[in-house]
Each structure stands twice: as C-alpha cells, then as structure tokens.
Amino acid sequence: MRTPMIAGNWKMNKTPAETKALIEDLKKIENRSGAEVVVCPMTVCLSTAAEALKGSEIHLGAQNVHFADKGAYTGECNAASLKELGVEYVIIGHSERRQYFAETDVTVNQRTLKALEAGLKPIVCVGESLEQKQQGITNEVVCLQTKVALLNVGEKIDDVVIAYEPVWAIGTGLTATPEDANATIGAIRGAIREVFGEAADRVRILYGGSMNDKNAHDLMAQPEIDGGLIGGASLAAEKFSGVINFN
Ligand code: 13P
C-alpha cells in the first residue's frame, strides 16, 4: 500500500551544468520497480534541475528549508522560493545538518511545520550515532527524534516521509543489516502510531546509509523498509539506476 521511494541526496556535489547532465542521463533510465524517484540537488541548482526535469516522472527535492517565511537569515532559503521553483520534497534534519550546522530536534520540527504549511513534503531524517548504537539505545534515540520532529504535524502526517539514517553508516561503506534496519524502522513506525494512530501505516520510512546497487535488493525486501535515501550511489546514473531497479 506504500509506494516505494528512491531519493538521491546529492549533498554538496554537482554544479548546475553537472546537475543538468546527470538529470538528462537519469531521464533515459527505465524504471522497472515502479518506485517514486526523487533527486535532491544543491539549492543553487534547483532551478536548473526543475527545468531539466520538465515532462519527466522524476520528482524534485531540496536539501533544507528555513522555518521563517522570510527575513534576516543570511544564507538560508525559504519555503515559498522552493515552492515557486517547483520543488515538491525537502530533506530536513539530515545528520550532516545536525553535526555541522547546529540543527536540533526542535529546529527540525520548526522546519518540518513550515515545509508542510507551504505545501512541501518533508523527508525528515533521524538516526543514531555509533556511540548510541553501542550503548543499545538506538530505538530510544530515533523514536524521540521522530516524535519531536513531528510535534503538531496533525493531519499533514500523510505528507511526511521519514528517513532512518544511522550516522555510522553514512558515507562509510557500512550498512545496517537489512534485519536491523527493518527492526529500527518498525520501532519508528510504532512511535508514529502512538501519536498518529493508523496513519502510521501510510507513512513511508526510508533507509539511508551506504545503500547502493548491490545491497538495495536485500534492504528493499524487508517489509518495513519503503525506500532509500541515497548519497554516493546517486551521483552516477548507472549506479543510481541499479538502486531504482532494486527488484
Ligand atoms: P551515503 O549513501 O553516501 O552513505 O549517504 C547517505 C545519506 O546521507 C543520504 O542522505
């Protein structure tokens, strides 16, 4: 009942010209899995990407959005501008934002609420650090992150996507085992169910962290895993194609 989603987080890679070239390559890929495909380029590349994606079935996402409508927030980007460019999804609370840019569960919630108010669909990232994993508190950490991120979301829960990205698995080549990722995502769904009831069964929860064309099949075979948020393996069309066609 949940449409799988394969989303590429291009992080701080690809210039506008490279963005256009990669999108042109991605448009040639046959999508045999039926997954909803999303690409999330750098903010400065979004308008090039929107133009290149015209007439294609690939969806456009941003990597961040500010929680104010507008104002004195040098370097930030507001939801209205993303909307105007034709952006549909926005990644919020990526662990790199939490680690390097002082993002907290509270600001993740603020950004999520603003995105939803503007008609953007947030892809909210949660995940435990290596230390938290070793202490055996993964479920507590990710469930709390999820619940705080979704405070006051209300009926808009149906527009939310969650991405479970264990911090120790990002860009390291280490992946959670499919079984572990499935169990943690099941716990996240349980936390959503506590607050939002049966809507939890409609919320897509992605896995992210060194997911690639080799391991996507086994991860996607798990019942709780509804898709992937892909970093490195989304930067070249051939590899990303292998993830999109995970089946
Ligand atoms: P990698 O796929 O490069 O590990 O990155 C995952 C990620 O952070 C996606 O948001």
Image (tube, rainbow, N blue to C red):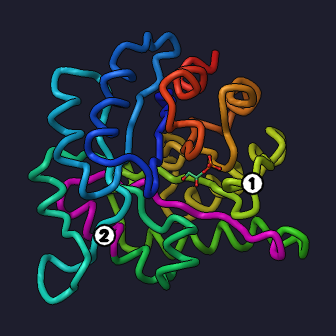
Dot 1 amino acid type: Thr
The residue drawn where x is 51% and y is 42% is: 204
Q: Secondary structure at mark 2?
A: helix
> Is 178 rendered above or below residue 56?
below
Q: Which mark is residue 113?
A: 2
Q: Earlier in the sequence, mark 1 or mark 2?
A: 2
Q: Is residue 61 magenta?
A: no
The residue drawn where x is 51% and y is 47% is: 198
The image position of residue 70, as x and y in percent, is 12, 79
Answer with the quarter of the image where residue 145 lies.
bottom right
Q: Which mark is residue 172?
A: 1
Q: How many marks?
A: 2
**Cα distance between the residues tagged 1 and 2:** 31 Å
Give the extent of the magenta segment.
111-132
Q: Is mark 2 within 8 Å of ligand 1?
A: no
The image position of residue 197, as x and y in percent, is 51, 55
> Is 23 rendered above or below residue 19?
above
Dot 2 amino acid type: Leu
Q: Is residue 119 magenta?
A: yes
The residue drawn where x is 32% and y is 39% is: 19
Q: Is mark 1 within 8 Å of ligand 1?
A: yes
The image position of residue 136, as x and y in percent, is 89, 70
Q: Which mark is residue 163?
A: none
